Image: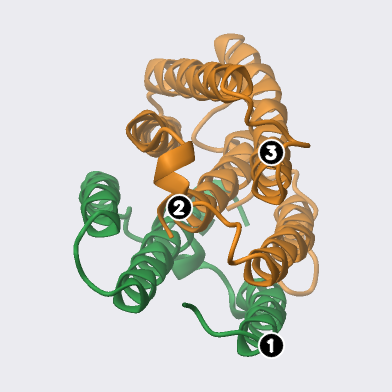
């Protein structure tokens, strides 16, 4: 299989991803200094970080167009990472 | 996406790409270990943990985050260019990515310098230890990425990459975007939360 044959998927909207990342980063900085309760701010910031990381992985790293096996390689350590983080976080609550 | 000479396994995946994804999987666990340690240490020292914005320069790091995001964009545009046979586009894209990666490192060194001048060092507090360890390891990854990008830039200037063979660009891209992705997480948990 040649490279040209393998690159049959539609090219992602790179500019759209770039602007999304930029706007979300600015929103993050604004939210970090907002008067909302700390717990709400932390949850929102983590949520936004996950969205941004997903955009980079899916479109810039072309994970969206990869074979299922690549997903397994990525998702398994991510699952372990989430388990570790949840276990560590469950020991204490955010004040 | 693989060149015609690329070794393809039974899974139909270029073995070089498979290797870089496996490497990135190990990197996920590496940074998870560091971030997990950070969470443990932070929650064990809540009473002495400072508000990050009182110690760190958020606007400066915000600009640095913007620079890293831009570098990912220039790299994908370079990749898209070579896929369409536009070699000059690849060269410009790679050059801009090297430049932006180097600026990121320069700003990080400047930030370290300012912090150390203010007495915030790796041994001054537990927050200092966490901050310099996490950002230092990430910076080392950026440095390695810039070196790799320079190699790819030189190869692109020599006309190595074509629409039929651009695996080298794609592999360095996977690594660089991963480094960008890690920074997105670190920026949030170290500087904003």
Circle 1 sits in a helix, a strand or a loop, which is it?
A: helix
Q: Nearer the viewer, mark 2 or mark 3?
A: 2
User: How much space separates mark 1 and mark 2, taking CA atoms?
Assistant: 24 Å
Q: Nearer the viewer, residue B166 or B34?
A: B34
Q: Colour of chain A?
A: green
Q: Nearer the viewer, mark 1 or mark 2?
A: 2
Please tell me whether residue B125 is drawn above or below residue B97 in the rendered image. Answer: below
Name the quadrant containing residue A90. Answer: bottom right
Name the residue carrying label 3. B132
Name the residue carrying label 2. B51
Q: Are marks 2 and 3 on the same chain?
A: yes
Quick one: quadrant of the N terminus of chain A?
Answer: bottom right
Q: Return the disc, 2 or 3, that comes first in the chain's sequence.
A: 2
Residue B102, given in percent of the width and then of the height, sits at: 55, 18
Name the residue carrying label 1. A87
Q: Chain of mark 2?
A: B
According to the colouring, which chain is orange?
B
* Residue, far front: B47
Image mark for residue A57: none
């Amino acid at each position: 299989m040649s490279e040209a044959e393998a690159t049959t998927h539609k090219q992602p909207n790179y500019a759209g991803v770039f602007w999304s990342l930029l706007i979300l980063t600015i929103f993050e900085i604004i939210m970090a200094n907002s008067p909302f309760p700390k717990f709400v701010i932390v949850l929102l910031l983590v949520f936004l970080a996950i969205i941004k990381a997903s955009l980079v992985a899916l479109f810039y790293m072309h994970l969206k167009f990869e074979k299922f096996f690549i997903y397994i390689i990525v998702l398994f350590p991510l699952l372990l990472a989430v388990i570790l983080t949840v276990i560590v976080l469950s020991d204490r609550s955010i004040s | 996406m693989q060149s015609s000479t690329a070794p393809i396994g039974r899974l139909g995946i270029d073995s070089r790409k498979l290797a870089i994804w496996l490497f990135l999987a190990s990197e996920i666990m590496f940074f998870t270990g560091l971030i997990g340690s950070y969470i443990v240490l932070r929650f064990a020292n809540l009473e002495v943990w400072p508000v990050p914005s009182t110690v760190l320069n958020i606007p400066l790091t915000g600009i640095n985050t913007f620079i890293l995001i831009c570098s990912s964009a220039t790299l994908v545009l370079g990749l898209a260019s070579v896929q369409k046979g536009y070699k000059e586009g690849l060269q410009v894209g790679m050059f801009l990515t090297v430049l932006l990666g180097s600026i990121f490192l320069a700003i990080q060194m400047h930030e370290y310098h300012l912090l150390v001048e203010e007495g915030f060092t790796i041994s001054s507090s537990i927050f200092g230890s966490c901050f310099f360890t996490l950002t230092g390891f990430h910076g080392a990854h950026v440095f390695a990425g810039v070196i790799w990008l320079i190699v790819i830039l030189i190869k692109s200037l020599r006309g190595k990459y074509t629409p039929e063979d651009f695996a080298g660009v794609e592999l360095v891209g996977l690594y660089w975007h991963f480094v960008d992705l890690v920074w997105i997480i670190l920026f949030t948990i170290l500087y904003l939360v």
